[in-house]
Image (spheres, rainbow, N blue to C red):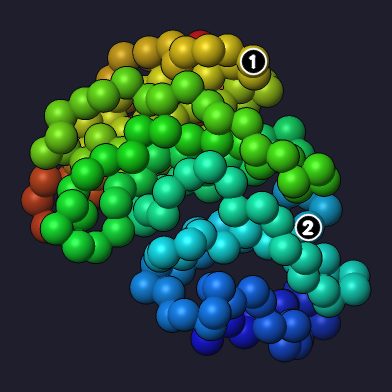
C-alpha cells in the first residue's frame, strides 16, 4: 500500500493524502521508503529493487517524481535534510544472501533541481558490526554520522572530500536516532542487557 495520512495539531484531525508513488510496474516493495521534511515538502527515498524518489507538497496534496539517483537499493539507511537538500547515507544490502553487506556510500539530492551529488564513503569498519548502519544529525552546517553499533563518530563539512573522525561516542550498545541541544550531540543507546538503556552525549567539534 502507498497511501498515507496527515495530522493537523490545531484541529486534532487526520486527513487522507494523495496516494504515493509505487515501484516501476507496480512491483511490491519489501523495504519501506523513508521520508524527510526539507522545510517546504516531504521527500521520500528507498524501496527494494528500483528505489523510489518523490516529493509531496501538502498545500496542493500532490506528488512529483524525482530521479532515484546513483545509490543502490538498501535498508536501514539514514535519510536526513541538510540545508534544503536530502542526504541518503549508509545502510546495508536488503535481504538475500548478502544482507550483511554494508553500504558505506551516500549521496545528496537537491529536490529543486533533481540533481544528485555523491558523498565520500564512510571509513570501512568491522563487517560483523553493521558498519553501514548509522545515525545522523546536522549542526552548524555540517553533517555528523555515528555507527549504530561501534559508535565511532564522523563529521563532514560541506564540499569536503573526506569524513573527519571524532573518535567513539563511548556508548556500550546499539545507538538510536540522535538530536542536537545546547551545542551537544545527544543520543540514546540500547545497552548489552535486555531492557537496559544507556544515555550519552558528545560535544560537537
Mark 2 neighbour class, 10 Å CA radius: few under 14, some 14 to 19, many 20 or more: some
Residue occupying the point 55% across, 73% down = 24
Residue occupying the point 58% across, 12% down = 160
Label 1 or label 2, whichever comes before in sequence order: 2
The mark found on residue 159 in the picture is 1
The residue sitting at the front extreme is 25
For marks 1 and 2, give the one nearer the viewer: 1
Secondary structure found at label 1: loop
The mark found on residue 41 in the picture is 2
Image position of 133 with respect to 54: above or below = above
Secondary structure found at label 2: loop
Residue occupying the point 18% across, 52% down = 98
Q: Nearer the viewer, residue 205 or 1?
A: 1
Find the distance from the CA under tag 1 to the CA under tag 2.
Answer: 24 Å
Question: For residue 29, what is the image quadrant?
Answer: bottom left
Q: Tell how many labels.
A: 2
Q: Position of residue 63 (x, y in %)?
A: 77, 70
Q: Where is residue 116 in the image (x, y as percent from the top left)?
A: 65, 38
CB within 8 Å, label 1 to label 2: no
> Left or right: 40 with respect to 204?
right
> Left or right: 91 with respect to 185?
left
Image position of 90 with respect to 194: above or below = above
Mark 1 neighbour class, 10 Å CA radius: few under 14, some 14 to 19, many 20 or more: few
Residue occupying the point 30% across, 48% down = 92
Q: Position of residue 200 (x, y in %)?
A: 34, 33
Amino acid at each position: 500500500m502507498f497511501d498515507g495520512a496527515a495530522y493537523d495539531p490545531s484541529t486534532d484531525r487526520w486527513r487522507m493524502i494523495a496516494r504515493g508513488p509505487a515501484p516501476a510496474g507496480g512491483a511490491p516493495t519489501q523495504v519501506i521508503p523513508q521520508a524527510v521534511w526539507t522545510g517546504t515538502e516531504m521527500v521520500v527515498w528507498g524501496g527494494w529493487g528500483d528505489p523510489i524518489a518523490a516529493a509531496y507538497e501538502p498545500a496542493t496534496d500532490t506528488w512529483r517524481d524525482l530521479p532515484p539517483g546513483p545509490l543502490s537499493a538498501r535498508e536501514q539507511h539514514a535519510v536526513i535534510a541538510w540545508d534544503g537538500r536530502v542526504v541518503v547515507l549508509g545502510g546495508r544490502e536488503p535481504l538475500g544472501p548478502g544482507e550483511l553487506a554494508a553500504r558505506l556510500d551516500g549521496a545528496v539530492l537537491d529536490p529543486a533541481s533533481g540533481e544528485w551529488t555523491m558523498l565520500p564513503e564512510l571509513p570501512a569498519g568491522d563487517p560483523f558490526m553493521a558498519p553501514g548502519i548509522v545515525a545522523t544529525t546536522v549542526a552548524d552546517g555540517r553533517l555528523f554520522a555515528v555507527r549504530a553499533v561501534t559508535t565511532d563518530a564522523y563529521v563532514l563539512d560541506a564540499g569536503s572530500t573526506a569524513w573527519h573522525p571524532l573518535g567513539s561516542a563511548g556508548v556500550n550498545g546499539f545507538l538510536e536516532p540522535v538530536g542536537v541541544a545546547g551545542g551537544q550531540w545527544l543520543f540514546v543507546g540500547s545497552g548489552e542487557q535486555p531492557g537496559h538503556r544507556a544515555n550519552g552525549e558528545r560535544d560537537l567539534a
